[in-house]
Image (cartoon, coloured by chain):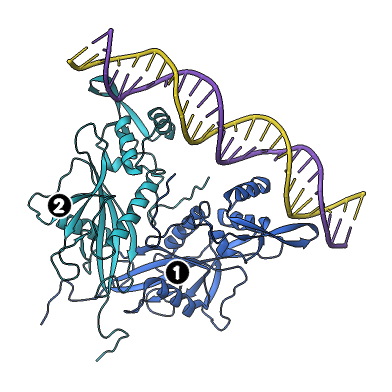
Chain colours: A cyan, B blue, C yellow, D purple
Amino acid sequence: MTQTDSPTDEIRVAVSTVIFSLRRERAGEPARVVLPLVRRTRDPHEGQWALPGGWLNATENLEPAASRTLAETTGLVPSFLEQLYAFGDTGRSPARTISIVYWALVREDTTLATELENVAWFDAVTLPQLAFDHNDIVDYALWRVRNKVGYSRIAHGLLPELFTLAELREVYEALLGRTLDPANFRRQVENSETLIPTEDFRTGPHRPARLYRYDQDVELADRGPLPHSSLALR
Amino acid sequence: MTQTDSPTDEIRVAVSTVIFSLRRERAGEPARVVLPLVRRTRDPHEGQWALPGGWLNATENLEPAASRTLAETTGLVPSFLEQLYAFGDTGRSPARTISIVYWALVREDTTLATELENVAWFDAVTLPQLAFDHNDIVDYALWRVRNKVGYSRIAHGLLPELFTLAELREVYEALLGRTLDPANFRRQVENSETLIPTEDFRTGPHRPARLYRYDQDVELADRGPLPHSSLALR
DNA sequence: GCAAAAGTGTTATTATTACACCCATGC
DNA sequence: GCATGGGTGTAATAATAACACTTTTGC
Protein backbone atom coordinates (compact mmCIF):
# COMPACT_ATOMS: atom_id res chain seq x y z
CA MET A 1 0.00 0.00 0.00
CA THR A 2 1.53 3.26 -1.08
CA GLN A 3 1.12 6.61 0.59
CA THR A 4 1.52 10.00 -1.07
CA ASP A 5 1.53 13.62 -0.01
CA SER A 6 -1.88 14.13 -1.54
CA PRO A 7 -4.08 11.18 -0.60
CA THR A 8 -7.32 12.97 -1.39
CA ASP A 9 -7.38 14.46 -4.87
CA GLU A 10 -5.10 14.08 -7.82
CA ILE A 11 -4.02 17.12 -9.79
CA ARG A 12 -5.88 17.20 -13.08
CA VAL A 13 -4.52 18.91 -16.20
CA ALA A 14 -6.83 20.71 -18.59
CA VAL A 15 -6.13 22.58 -21.80
CA SER A 16 -8.22 25.48 -23.06
CA THR A 17 -7.87 28.10 -25.74
CA VAL A 18 -8.75 31.74 -26.30
CA ILE A 19 -9.68 31.87 -29.97
CA PHE A 20 -9.78 35.23 -31.73
CA SER A 21 -11.28 36.06 -35.07
CA LEU A 22 -12.62 39.17 -36.80
CA ARG A 23 -16.20 39.90 -37.77
CA ARG A 24 -17.91 42.88 -39.33
CA GLU A 25 -21.61 43.50 -38.97
CA ARG A 26 -22.01 44.90 -42.47
CA ALA A 27 -19.56 45.48 -45.27
CA GLY A 28 -17.90 48.85 -44.83
CA GLU A 29 -18.06 48.78 -41.06
CA PRO A 30 -14.86 48.32 -39.06
CA ALA A 31 -14.15 44.73 -38.03
CA ARG A 32 -14.43 43.72 -34.40
CA VAL A 33 -12.50 41.10 -32.44
CA VAL A 34 -14.72 38.17 -31.53
CA LEU A 35 -14.17 34.87 -29.79
CA PRO A 36 -16.17 31.64 -29.47
CA LEU A 37 -17.35 30.54 -26.03
CA VAL A 38 -18.98 27.34 -24.83
CA ARG A 39 -21.89 27.19 -22.43
CA ARG A 40 -21.12 24.95 -19.49
CA THR A 41 -23.48 22.04 -18.94
CA ARG A 42 -21.95 20.76 -15.72
CA ASP A 43 -21.67 21.59 -12.11
CA PRO A 44 -19.02 24.25 -11.56
CA HIS A 45 -20.50 27.38 -13.15
CA GLU A 46 -23.19 25.46 -15.02
CA GLY A 47 -24.95 27.64 -17.54
CA GLN A 48 -22.16 30.24 -17.73
CA TRP A 49 -20.04 30.77 -20.80
CA ALA A 50 -16.47 29.52 -20.73
CA LEU A 51 -13.40 29.05 -22.91
CA PRO A 52 -13.42 25.94 -25.08
CA GLY A 53 -11.18 23.20 -23.74
CA GLY A 54 -10.95 19.74 -22.25
CA TRP A 55 -8.79 17.33 -20.32
CA LEU A 56 -5.28 16.47 -21.37
CA ASN A 57 -4.85 12.83 -22.36
CA ALA A 58 -1.94 11.01 -20.77
CA THR A 59 -0.26 10.30 -24.09
CA GLU A 60 -1.02 13.60 -25.80
CA ASN A 61 1.29 16.57 -26.31
CA LEU A 62 0.10 19.97 -25.14
CA GLU A 63 -0.37 21.80 -28.42
CA PRO A 64 -2.20 18.91 -30.11
CA ALA A 65 -4.42 18.72 -27.05
CA ALA A 66 -5.30 22.37 -27.52
CA SER A 67 -6.05 21.78 -31.20
CA ARG A 68 -8.13 18.72 -30.43
CA THR A 69 -10.22 20.22 -27.63
CA LEU A 70 -10.97 23.40 -29.54
CA ALA A 71 -11.97 21.37 -32.58
CA GLU A 72 -14.17 19.08 -30.50
CA THR A 73 -15.98 21.93 -28.81
CA THR A 74 -16.19 24.49 -31.62
CA GLY A 75 -15.34 22.72 -34.88
CA LEU A 76 -12.76 25.39 -35.66
CA VAL A 77 -9.29 24.89 -37.12
CA PRO A 78 -6.88 27.63 -36.08
CA SER A 79 -4.35 29.32 -38.35
CA PHE A 80 -2.15 30.19 -35.38
CA LEU A 81 -1.77 28.56 -31.97
CA GLU A 82 0.53 29.52 -29.12
CA GLN A 83 0.71 28.90 -25.41
CA LEU A 84 -0.55 31.79 -23.30
CA TYR A 85 -0.05 30.85 -19.65
CA ALA A 86 -0.47 28.02 -17.17
CA PHE A 87 -3.05 28.76 -14.51
CA GLY A 88 -3.05 26.47 -11.54
CA ASP A 89 -3.88 28.19 -8.29
CA THR A 90 -6.09 26.37 -5.83
CA GLY A 91 -9.44 28.07 -5.58
CA ARG A 92 -9.88 28.51 -9.31
CA SER A 93 -12.12 25.47 -9.28
CA PRO A 94 -13.45 23.06 -6.64
CA ALA A 95 -11.14 20.25 -7.76
CA ARG A 96 -7.45 21.04 -8.14
CA THR A 97 -6.88 21.74 -11.80
CA ILE A 98 -3.95 23.00 -13.83
CA SER A 99 -5.17 24.80 -16.92
CA ILE A 100 -2.67 25.21 -19.71
CA VAL A 101 -4.22 27.98 -21.76
CA TYR A 102 -3.41 28.55 -25.42
CA TRP A 103 -4.50 31.37 -27.68
CA ALA A 104 -5.35 31.00 -31.33
CA LEU A 105 -6.40 32.87 -34.44
CA VAL A 106 -8.91 31.70 -37.03
CA ARG A 107 -9.54 33.39 -40.36
CA GLU A 108 -12.50 35.64 -40.82
CA ASP A 109 -14.38 33.33 -43.18
CA THR A 110 -14.48 30.34 -40.84
CA THR A 111 -17.69 29.48 -39.05
CA LEU A 112 -18.63 27.42 -36.07
CA ALA A 113 -19.86 23.88 -36.68
CA THR A 114 -23.52 24.56 -37.24
CA GLU A 115 -24.80 21.60 -35.28
CA LEU A 116 -23.27 22.89 -32.05
CA GLU A 117 -25.90 24.57 -29.91
CA ASN A 118 -23.92 25.65 -26.89
CA VAL A 119 -21.30 27.61 -28.77
CA ALA A 120 -21.50 31.26 -29.80
CA TRP A 121 -19.33 34.17 -30.86
CA PHE A 122 -18.89 37.12 -28.48
CA ASP A 123 -17.39 40.56 -28.88
CA ALA A 124 -14.03 40.32 -27.12
CA VAL A 125 -14.21 43.69 -25.41
CA THR A 126 -17.79 43.53 -24.10
CA LEU A 127 -17.94 40.05 -22.62
CA PRO A 128 -20.51 38.97 -20.04
CA GLN A 129 -19.29 37.41 -16.84
CA LEU A 130 -17.65 34.11 -17.69
CA ALA A 131 -17.03 30.94 -15.70
CA PHE A 132 -13.97 30.62 -13.45
CA ASP A 133 -11.34 33.33 -14.07
CA HIS A 134 -11.91 33.29 -17.79
CA ASN A 135 -12.57 37.04 -18.08
CA ASP A 136 -9.06 37.72 -16.80
CA ILE A 137 -7.62 35.12 -19.14
CA VAL A 138 -9.30 36.71 -22.15
CA ASP A 139 -8.04 40.13 -21.10
CA TYR A 140 -4.52 38.77 -20.88
CA ALA A 141 -4.83 37.09 -24.28
CA LEU A 142 -6.08 40.36 -25.77
CA TRP A 143 -3.11 42.17 -24.33
CA ARG A 144 -0.81 39.54 -25.76
CA VAL A 145 -2.24 39.69 -29.26
CA ARG A 146 -2.22 43.49 -29.30
CA ASN A 147 1.34 43.50 -28.20
CA LYS A 148 2.42 40.79 -30.58
CA VAL A 149 0.83 42.27 -33.68
CA GLY A 150 3.37 45.07 -33.38
CA TYR A 151 6.48 42.94 -33.73
CA SER A 152 5.42 39.72 -35.43
CA ARG A 153 3.40 38.63 -38.41
CA ILE A 154 0.40 37.20 -36.60
CA ALA A 155 -1.93 39.36 -38.71
CA HIS A 156 -1.26 36.71 -41.32
CA GLY A 157 -3.40 34.33 -39.27
CA LEU A 158 -6.45 36.49 -39.80
CA LEU A 159 -6.01 37.04 -43.54
CA PRO A 160 -6.37 34.90 -46.65
CA GLU A 161 -3.35 33.98 -48.76
CA LEU A 162 -3.57 37.19 -50.79
CA PHE A 163 -4.61 40.51 -49.34
CA THR A 164 -4.41 44.23 -49.96
CA LEU A 165 -2.55 46.63 -47.72
CA ALA A 166 -5.89 48.09 -46.68
CA GLU A 167 -7.08 44.68 -45.55
CA LEU A 168 -3.88 44.17 -43.61
CA ARG A 169 -4.29 47.58 -42.04
CA GLU A 170 -7.86 46.77 -41.04
CA VAL A 171 -6.60 43.74 -39.12
CA TYR A 172 -4.20 45.96 -37.21
CA GLU A 173 -6.92 48.53 -36.59
CA ALA A 174 -9.35 45.92 -35.30
CA LEU A 175 -6.79 44.39 -32.95
CA LEU A 176 -5.40 47.67 -31.68
CA GLY A 177 -8.76 49.39 -31.53
CA ARG A 178 -7.66 52.55 -33.28
CA THR A 179 -7.25 53.82 -36.81
CA LEU A 180 -3.87 53.99 -38.52
CA ASP A 181 -2.66 56.40 -41.16
CA PRO A 182 -2.85 54.50 -44.48
CA ALA A 183 0.19 56.25 -45.96
CA ASN A 184 2.44 55.64 -42.97
CA PHE A 185 1.16 52.10 -42.53
CA ARG A 186 2.04 51.34 -46.13
CA ARG A 187 5.59 52.57 -45.71
CA GLN A 188 6.10 50.68 -42.47
CA VAL A 189 5.09 47.31 -43.84
CA GLU A 190 6.95 47.95 -47.09
CA ASN A 191 10.12 48.69 -45.13
CA SER A 192 9.66 45.59 -42.99
CA GLU A 193 10.45 43.46 -46.06
CA THR A 194 8.01 40.75 -45.02
CA LEU A 195 5.53 41.21 -47.88
CA ILE A 196 5.82 40.09 -51.48
CA PRO A 197 3.80 42.14 -53.99
CA THR A 198 1.94 40.13 -56.61
CA GLU A 199 0.70 41.19 -60.03
CA ASP A 200 -2.91 40.62 -59.01
CA PHE A 201 -5.25 43.39 -58.00
CA ARG A 202 -8.44 43.68 -55.99
CA THR A 203 -10.98 45.73 -57.96
CA GLY A 204 -13.89 47.77 -56.71
CA PRO A 205 -15.46 51.16 -57.17
CA HIS A 206 -12.02 52.73 -56.91
CA ARG A 207 -8.46 52.31 -58.11
CA PRO A 208 -7.46 48.61 -58.03
CA ALA A 209 -5.40 47.64 -54.99
CA ARG A 210 -2.36 45.45 -55.34
CA LEU A 211 -2.50 42.07 -53.63
CA TYR A 212 0.36 40.97 -51.41
CA ARG A 213 1.41 37.71 -49.80
CA TYR A 214 3.61 37.09 -46.78
CA ASP A 215 7.21 36.14 -47.46
CA GLN A 216 7.52 32.60 -46.12
CA ASP A 217 11.29 32.86 -46.02
CA VAL A 218 11.33 35.66 -43.48
CA GLU A 219 11.95 34.31 -40.02
CA LEU A 220 9.06 35.10 -37.74
CA ALA A 221 10.23 37.85 -35.40
CA ASP A 222 8.07 35.77 -33.18
CA ARG A 223 9.72 33.35 -30.85
CA GLY A 224 8.42 30.29 -29.08
CA PRO A 225 10.55 28.55 -26.53
CA LEU A 226 11.98 25.42 -28.06
CA PRO A 227 12.23 25.53 -31.84
CA HIS A 228 14.46 28.56 -32.35
CA SER A 229 17.98 29.12 -31.18
CA SER A 230 19.81 32.25 -32.33
CA LEU A 231 19.30 35.46 -30.41
CA ALA A 232 19.28 38.74 -32.23
CA LEU A 233 18.74 41.68 -29.84
CA ARG A 234 20.59 43.89 -32.33
CA MET B 1 -14.97 0.12 -10.81
CA THR B 2 -14.17 3.24 -12.74
CA GLN B 3 -12.45 3.38 -16.08
CA THR B 4 -10.51 6.32 -17.45
CA ASP B 5 -8.83 7.25 -20.70
CA SER B 6 -5.42 6.82 -19.12
CA PRO B 7 -5.41 3.65 -17.04
CA THR B 8 -1.63 3.36 -16.96
CA ASP B 9 0.11 6.48 -15.69
CA GLU B 10 -1.13 9.60 -14.04
CA ILE B 11 0.07 12.97 -15.24
CA ARG B 12 2.48 14.44 -12.72
CA VAL B 13 3.06 18.17 -12.31
CA ALA B 14 6.48 19.55 -11.50
CA VAL B 15 7.72 23.10 -10.99
CA SER B 16 11.23 24.25 -11.75
CA THR B 17 12.99 27.58 -12.05
CA VAL B 18 15.71 29.19 -14.10
CA ILE B 19 17.49 31.44 -11.61
CA PHE B 20 19.75 34.20 -12.91
CA SER B 21 22.28 36.22 -11.02
CA LEU B 22 25.40 38.20 -11.84
CA ARG B 23 28.98 37.40 -10.85
CA ARG B 24 32.30 39.01 -11.63
CA GLU B 25 35.58 37.15 -11.37
CA ARG B 26 37.51 40.10 -10.05
CA ALA B 27 36.52 43.67 -9.29
CA GLY B 28 36.78 45.76 -12.44
CA GLU B 29 35.88 42.92 -14.75
CA PRO B 30 32.51 42.90 -16.50
CA ALA B 31 29.83 40.88 -14.71
CA ARG B 32 28.58 37.64 -16.23
CA VAL B 33 25.17 35.99 -16.05
CA VAL B 34 25.25 32.86 -13.93
CA LEU B 35 22.65 30.37 -12.78
CA PRO B 36 22.57 27.64 -10.13
CA LEU B 37 22.07 24.03 -11.21
CA VAL B 38 21.47 20.87 -9.24
CA ARG B 39 23.15 17.57 -9.92
CA ARG B 40 20.62 14.79 -10.36
CA THR B 41 20.91 11.84 -8.00
CA ARG B 42 18.17 9.69 -9.50
CA ASP B 43 17.45 7.61 -12.49
CA PRO B 44 16.49 9.78 -15.43
CA HIS B 45 19.69 11.62 -16.33
CA GLU B 46 21.43 10.71 -13.06
CA GLY B 47 24.65 12.64 -12.60
CA GLN B 48 23.72 15.40 -15.07
CA TRP B 49 23.05 18.96 -14.05
CA ALA B 50 19.46 20.18 -14.07
CA LEU B 51 17.27 23.12 -13.13
CA PRO B 52 16.25 23.25 -9.48
CA GLY B 53 12.66 22.18 -8.92
CA GLY B 54 10.31 19.65 -7.41
CA TRP B 55 6.81 18.26 -7.44
CA LEU B 56 3.77 20.43 -7.03
CA ASN B 57 1.79 19.71 -3.88
CA ALA B 58 -1.93 19.21 -4.31
CA THR B 59 -2.84 22.17 -2.10
CA GLU B 60 -0.08 24.52 -3.21
CA ASN B 61 -0.31 27.43 -5.64
CA LEU B 62 2.12 27.52 -8.54
CA GLU B 63 4.30 30.50 -7.67
CA PRO B 64 4.73 29.46 -4.02
CA ALA B 65 5.67 26.01 -5.27
CA ALA B 66 8.39 27.58 -7.40
CA SER B 67 9.65 29.58 -4.42
CA ARG B 68 9.58 26.55 -2.16
CA THR B 69 11.33 24.14 -4.51
CA LEU B 70 14.08 26.59 -5.41
CA ALA B 71 14.64 27.36 -1.73
CA GLU B 72 14.74 23.66 -0.84
CA THR B 73 17.24 22.82 -3.55
CA THR B 74 19.46 25.90 -3.55
CA GLY B 75 18.70 27.90 -0.41
CA LEU B 76 18.17 31.01 -2.50
CA VAL B 77 15.44 33.63 -2.08
CA PRO B 78 14.59 35.37 -5.35
CA SER B 79 13.97 39.07 -5.78
CA PHE B 80 11.84 38.45 -8.87
CA LEU B 81 9.83 35.44 -9.96
CA GLU B 82 7.70 35.00 -13.06
CA GLN B 83 6.29 32.10 -15.03
CA LEU B 84 8.25 31.25 -18.15
CA TYR B 85 6.43 28.43 -19.92
CA ALA B 86 4.68 25.13 -19.35
CA PHE B 87 6.49 22.20 -20.92
CA GLY B 88 4.55 19.01 -21.17
CA ASP B 89 5.27 16.99 -24.26
CA THR B 90 5.52 13.25 -23.94
CA GLY B 91 9.05 12.10 -24.46
CA ARG B 92 10.62 14.79 -22.30
CA SER B 93 10.86 12.22 -19.54
CA PRO B 94 10.04 8.51 -19.13
CA ALA B 95 7.00 9.24 -16.96
CA ARG B 96 4.49 11.78 -18.26
CA THR B 97 5.32 15.05 -16.57
CA ILE B 98 4.07 18.60 -16.92
CA SER B 99 6.81 21.06 -15.94
CA ILE B 100 5.69 24.56 -15.11
CA VAL B 101 8.90 26.51 -15.42
CA TYR B 102 9.49 29.84 -13.72
CA TRP B 103 12.40 32.19 -14.04
CA ALA B 104 13.85 34.24 -11.24
CA LEU B 105 16.47 36.80 -10.33
CA VAL B 106 18.59 36.87 -7.20
CA ARG B 107 20.85 39.73 -6.16
CA GLU B 108 24.54 39.55 -6.73
CA ASP B 109 25.48 39.29 -3.06
CA THR B 110 23.41 36.18 -2.33
CA THR B 111 25.15 32.85 -2.03
CA LEU B 112 24.12 29.23 -2.19
CA ALA B 113 23.46 27.42 1.04
CA THR B 114 26.96 26.18 1.86
CA GLU B 115 25.93 22.77 3.06
CA LEU B 116 24.55 21.83 -0.33
CA GLU B 117 26.99 19.70 -2.24
CA ASN B 118 25.17 19.03 -5.45
CA VAL B 119 24.51 22.66 -6.36
CA ALA B 120 26.82 24.95 -8.27
CA TRP B 121 26.81 28.16 -10.31
CA PHE B 122 27.34 28.01 -14.06
CA ASP B 123 27.99 30.64 -16.69
CA ALA B 124 24.65 30.98 -18.49
CA VAL B 125 26.07 31.20 -21.99
CA THR B 126 28.59 28.35 -21.79
CA LEU B 127 26.55 25.59 -20.16
CA PRO B 128 27.44 21.90 -20.37
CA GLN B 129 24.80 19.50 -21.58
CA LEU B 130 22.00 19.44 -19.04
CA ALA B 131 19.35 16.87 -18.18
CA PHE B 132 16.12 16.68 -20.14
CA ASP B 133 15.50 19.71 -22.41
CA HIS B 134 16.92 22.09 -19.86
CA ASN B 135 19.44 23.68 -22.23
CA ASP B 136 16.60 24.86 -24.43
CA ILE B 137 14.68 26.11 -21.42
CA VAL B 138 17.65 28.16 -20.22
CA ASP B 139 18.09 29.60 -23.71
CA TYR B 140 14.47 30.65 -23.76
CA ALA B 141 14.72 32.19 -20.29
CA LEU B 142 17.82 34.10 -21.40
CA TRP B 143 15.94 35.40 -24.40
CA ARG B 144 13.05 36.44 -22.15
CA VAL B 145 15.23 38.30 -19.66
CA ARG B 146 17.17 40.08 -22.40
CA ASN B 147 13.97 41.12 -24.03
CA LYS B 148 12.30 42.16 -20.82
CA VAL B 149 15.17 44.27 -19.49
CA GLY B 150 14.44 46.65 -22.36
CA TYR B 151 10.91 47.53 -21.37
CA SER B 152 10.55 46.75 -17.68
CA ARG B 153 12.43 47.34 -14.48
CA ILE B 154 13.67 43.85 -13.81
CA ALA B 155 17.24 45.17 -13.48
CA HIS B 156 16.00 46.19 -10.05
CA GLY B 157 15.99 42.51 -9.09
CA LEU B 158 19.76 42.32 -9.54
CA LEU B 159 20.63 45.50 -7.66
CA PRO B 160 20.64 46.61 -4.03
CA GLU B 161 18.23 49.26 -2.76
CA LEU B 162 20.57 52.10 -3.76
CA PHE B 163 22.75 52.02 -6.84
CA THR B 164 24.66 54.27 -9.19
CA LEU B 165 23.78 54.72 -12.83
CA ALA B 166 27.00 52.93 -13.73
CA GLU B 167 25.94 49.93 -11.65
CA LEU B 168 22.55 49.92 -13.35
CA ARG B 169 24.22 50.14 -16.72
CA GLU B 170 26.49 47.22 -15.86
CA VAL B 171 23.40 45.09 -15.20
CA TYR B 172 22.08 45.94 -18.65
CA GLU B 173 25.45 45.28 -20.22
CA ALA B 174 25.78 41.89 -18.54
CA LEU B 175 22.29 40.81 -19.56
CA LEU B 176 22.51 42.10 -23.12
CA GLY B 177 26.10 41.05 -23.60
CA ARG B 178 27.27 44.34 -25.06
CA THR B 179 28.48 47.71 -23.84
CA LEU B 180 26.24 50.75 -23.74
CA ASP B 181 27.16 54.41 -24.10
CA PRO B 182 27.20 55.85 -20.57
CA ALA B 183 25.96 59.26 -21.67
CA ASN B 184 23.04 57.98 -23.70
CA PHE B 185 22.18 55.39 -21.07
CA ARG B 186 22.01 58.09 -18.44
CA ARG B 187 19.61 60.19 -20.49
CA GLN B 188 17.41 57.24 -21.29
CA VAL B 189 16.87 56.18 -17.70
CA GLU B 190 16.50 59.77 -16.57
CA ASN B 191 13.78 60.33 -19.14
CA SER B 192 12.02 57.12 -18.14
CA GLU B 193 11.08 58.76 -14.83
CA THR B 194 11.41 55.51 -12.92
CA LEU B 195 14.41 56.51 -10.81
CA ILE B 196 14.54 58.77 -7.77
CA PRO B 197 17.90 60.48 -7.17
CA THR B 198 19.09 60.50 -3.57
CA GLU B 199 21.54 62.82 -1.84
CA ASP B 200 23.93 59.96 -1.18
CA PHE B 201 27.00 59.26 -3.27
CA ARG B 202 29.24 56.31 -3.92
CA THR B 203 32.87 57.35 -3.53
CA GLY B 204 35.96 55.85 -5.07
CA PRO B 205 39.11 56.92 -6.88
CA HIS B 206 37.02 59.21 -9.05
CA ARG B 207 34.23 61.75 -8.90
CA PRO B 208 31.49 60.54 -6.50
CA ALA B 209 28.50 58.97 -8.23
CA ARG B 210 24.98 59.82 -7.15
CA LEU B 211 22.94 56.94 -5.76
CA TYR B 212 19.44 56.31 -7.10
CA ARG B 213 16.50 54.17 -6.02
CA TYR B 214 13.62 52.83 -8.05
CA ASP B 215 10.35 54.73 -7.83
CA GLN B 216 7.96 52.29 -6.19
CA ASP B 217 4.95 54.30 -7.38
CA VAL B 218 5.69 53.74 -11.04
CA GLU B 219 3.60 50.93 -12.41
CA LEU B 220 5.77 48.16 -13.72
CA ALA B 221 5.64 48.37 -17.50
CA ASP B 222 5.75 44.70 -16.89
CA ARG B 223 2.54 42.74 -17.08
CA GLY B 224 1.62 39.39 -15.68
CA PRO B 225 -1.67 37.79 -16.58
CA LEU B 226 -4.05 38.20 -13.72
CA PRO B 227 -3.30 41.15 -11.46
CA HIS B 228 -3.46 44.05 -13.92
CA SER B 229 -6.35 45.27 -15.94
CA SER B 230 -5.97 48.46 -18.00
CA LEU B 231 -4.35 48.25 -21.39
CA ALA B 232 -2.16 51.08 -22.57
CA LEU B 233 -0.71 50.43 -26.06
CA ARG B 234 -0.33 54.20 -26.53
C1' DG C 1 49.02 67.25 -11.44
C1' DC C 2 47.16 62.82 -13.10
C1' DA C 3 43.99 59.00 -13.68
C1' DA C 4 39.41 57.59 -13.64
C1' DA C 5 34.89 57.75 -13.73
C1' DA C 6 30.80 61.17 -13.39
C1' DG C 7 28.22 64.01 -15.88
C1' DT C 8 26.95 67.59 -19.95
C1' DG C 9 26.69 69.28 -24.78
C1' DT C 10 26.36 68.86 -29.68
C1' DT C 11 25.39 66.99 -33.94
C1' DA C 12 24.05 63.48 -37.38
C1' DT C 13 21.00 59.95 -38.42
C1' DT C 14 16.88 57.57 -38.33
C1' DA C 15 12.00 56.63 -37.12
C1' DT C 16 7.46 58.55 -36.35
C1' DT C 17 3.66 61.45 -37.39
C1' DA C 18 0.53 64.52 -39.74
C1' DC C 19 -1.37 65.78 -43.74
C1' DA C 20 -1.44 67.59 -48.63
C1' DC C 21 -2.06 65.85 -53.00
C1' DC C 22 -2.18 63.02 -57.24
C1' DC C 23 -3.85 58.42 -59.46
C1' DA C 24 -6.97 54.93 -61.39
C1' DT C 25 -11.03 52.81 -61.31
C1' DG C 26 -16.63 52.14 -61.45
C1' DC C 27 -20.56 54.40 -62.25
C1' DG D 1 -17.35 64.17 -64.27
C1' DC D 2 -17.45 62.54 -59.57
C1' DA D 3 -16.83 59.64 -55.62
C1' DT D 4 -13.75 56.38 -53.55
C1' DG D 5 -10.14 54.43 -51.94
C1' DG D 6 -5.04 53.53 -53.77
C1' DG D 7 -0.76 55.40 -53.60
C1' DT D 8 3.21 59.27 -53.32
C1' DG D 9 5.50 63.46 -51.40
C1' DT D 10 6.98 66.37 -47.83
C1' DA D 11 7.98 68.55 -43.73
C1' DA D 12 7.95 68.73 -38.54
C1' DT D 13 9.02 66.20 -34.59
C1' DA D 14 11.00 62.77 -31.71
C1' DA D 15 14.09 58.94 -30.65
C1' DT D 16 18.68 57.00 -31.25
C1' DA D 17 23.47 57.08 -31.58
C1' DA D 18 28.27 58.70 -31.71
C1' DC D 19 31.52 61.21 -29.49
C1' DA D 20 33.82 65.55 -27.75
C1' DC D 21 34.26 67.77 -23.65
C1' DT D 22 33.97 69.37 -18.70
C1' DT D 23 33.71 68.12 -13.61
C1' DT D 24 35.10 66.12 -9.29
C1' DT D 25 37.09 63.05 -6.69
C1' DG D 26 41.55 59.94 -4.71
C1' DC D 27 46.15 59.60 -4.81
Left or right of residue B68, residue A131 in this image:
left
Q: Amino acid at mark 2?
A: Gly
Q: Residue B6, labelled with which disc?
A: none
Q: Quadrant of the N terminus of chain B?
A: bottom left
| Label 1 CA crowd tier, 10 Å (few <14, some 14–19, many 20+) | many
Q: Which residue is mark 2?
A: A75
- Name which residue lies at 42% across and 73% down: B66
Q: Is residue A12 above or below residue B206?
A: below
Q: Which residue is mark 1?
A: B17
- Name which residue lies at 54% across and 81% down: B117
User: x and y percent of residue A162 in the render?
Assistant: 26, 32
**Which residue is at the front of the view, B198 or D23?**
B198
- Name which residue lies at 46% across and 58% down: B139
Q: Is residue A189 visible?
A: yes
Q: Is residue B95 above or below residue A222?
A: below
Q: Quadrant of the C terminus of chain B?
A: top left
Q: Is residue B73 above or below residue A41?
A: below
Q: Secondary structure at mark 2?
A: loop
Q: Seen from this angle, which residue lies furthest left? A: A115
The tally of labels here is 2
Q: Amino acid at mark 1?
A: Thr
**Disc 2 sits on a residue from what chain?**
A
Q: Seen from this angle, which residue lies furthest bottom? A: A1
Q: Quadrant of residue A221?
A: top left
User: x and y percent of residue D6 in the render?
Assistant: 32, 23
Q: CA distance from mark 1 to mark 2?
A: 37 Å
| Label 2 CA crowd tier, 10 Å (few <14, some 14–19, many 20+) | some
Does the residue at mark 1 contact the one at mark 2 (Cβ under 8 Å)? no
Left or right of residue B218, residue B225 in this image:
left
**Which residue is at the front of the view, A19 or A180?**
A180
Circle nearer the viewer, 1 or 2: 2
Left or right of residue D22, residue B12 in this image:
left
